[in-house]
Amino acid sequence: MELTDYQADERGFFLLEQGWELMNMMPAKASQTVTAEKPGQGPGTARPNRKLKIKNGAVGWSFIVIAAGLICLFYFYPMVQALLLSFQSGTGANLQFTGIDNYTRLLKDPTFLTTLKNTVIFLIVQVPVMIILALFLSVLLNNKTLKWKGLFRTAIFLPCVTSLVAYSVIFKYLFSQDGIINIMLMKLALISEPISWLTDPFWAKVTIIVAITWRWTGYNMIFYLSALQNVDQSIYEAAKMDGASSFQQFFRITVPMLKPIILFTSITSTIGTLQLFDEVMNITAGGPANATMTISQYIYNLSFKYTPDFGYAATVSYAIVILIVIFSIIQFKVAGDRNE
C-alpha cells in the first residue's frame, strides 16, 4: 500500500517525536555511548599504529644499514685497529705490546718534530692566504658587470680537477733551476741569478705553498660564490643608500653573511693541509734535508720506505688526529657563533 506525500510526512514527524522522547528518557551515561567514535580513536587502533611505526622504522633502517655497515667496516674499524697497533711494536705476527713506548719515542723523535714544524708552517701560512684569496675572487666574480665570468670561474676551478701527480710534476718543472719561473724573473730583471726553488729549504717551502694554494683556491671559491648568490641584493642597495663604501660592505655584510661557510672551508682546509702528502712527495720528495717533509710523508716512510715499523707509524698517524681535533676546536672557538 503506497502512502501519499502528506501521510509520509506525518509518519516521519511522528517517528522523530518518538525518537526525541526516547532520547530524553535515556540515562546520561547511556546517551554518551551512542556518540560516534572518531577515526583512529577506537580501542583496536593502538596496535595497528604501533605496527605501522615499526614497519616505517624498518624501511628507514633498511636504507642506511648497508651504508652504516660499510662506514663502520672501512672507517671506524681501521681507526680502532690503528689505535691498538700504536701500542705495539714489530712487524707481521711478531707484534709485541709495548704500552706507551711509541708515544714516548714520538716526543723525542727529531724527524717527527721536524715534520711537525713543517706541517704547522704550511698550515699557518697557506690556509689563511688561500681563504682570503678565494674570498676575494668569489666577490670579484660575483660582480654582475664582469664579462666572461663563466670563463674565469672555469679557469680558476680547473686545477681542482687536475690530476695530483700531473700538476705536481708541472710545478716541479716550472720551478726547476732552468724552469720558466726563473727565466721570466731574470728577463724582467727581478733576479740576477736563478733561484734554487727546489733545493733551498726556504724556497722549497714557498714552492709547496704556492702549489697547494694554486690547486685548492678554486675549490673554496665555489663555496663562497654559491653563498654570495643567495645573499639578498637589497641589503647591499640599502647599505649604498646609507653611504657605506665597498670596503665597509665587504666587512660589515659579506664577511658576516659568509661566516658559516668560511668556518667550514677553514676546517676542511686545515684537515687537508695536516694530511698533505702528494705535492711534497712529487715536487721535493720531502727535501732538501727533510725541510719540506710532512707528517703524512713520514708515516709513509715509516711504513714502506724505511724498515717497516707499523706500530710507530700508527702512533704518528694518531698525532695527526690529535692535531686535527685541536685546530678544529680552536677554529670553532675563534670563529664560532658567540651567541649560541
Image (tube, helix red, strand yellow):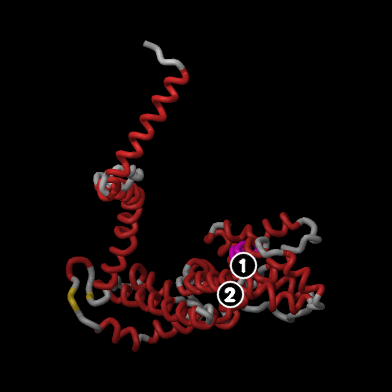
Q: Residues within 10 Å of mark 2 (few under 14, many from 20)?
A: many
In the rendered image, residue 84, in percent from the top left (x then y), is placed at 24, 72
Sequence order check: which comes first, mark 2 or mark 1? 2
Numbered label tally: 2
Asked if residue 196 is positioned above or below residue 281 in the image, the reply reads below
Residue 217 circle label:
1
Residue 136, quarter of picture: bottom right
The secondary structure that dominates the magenta segment is helix
The magenta stretch is 217-225
Mark 2 element type: helix
Question: Is 222 inside the magenta-drawn segment?
Answer: yes
Q: Residue at x 58, y 60 (%)?
A: 160
Residue pictured at 64% horizontal, 69% vertical: 134
Question: What x and y, as percent, mark residue 304?
Answer: 35, 67
Lateral position of residue 53 relative to residue 206, left or right: left
| Residue drawn at point x = 73 percent, y = 75 percent | 249
* Kind of residue sitting beneath label 2: Ile
Q: Name the disc covering residue 209, or none.
A: 2
Question: Spatial distance from mark 2 to mark 1, Cα to Cα?
Answer: 12 Å
**Kind of element beneath mark 1:** helix
Whether residue 206 is visible: yes
Q: Is residue 33 shown in magenta?
A: no
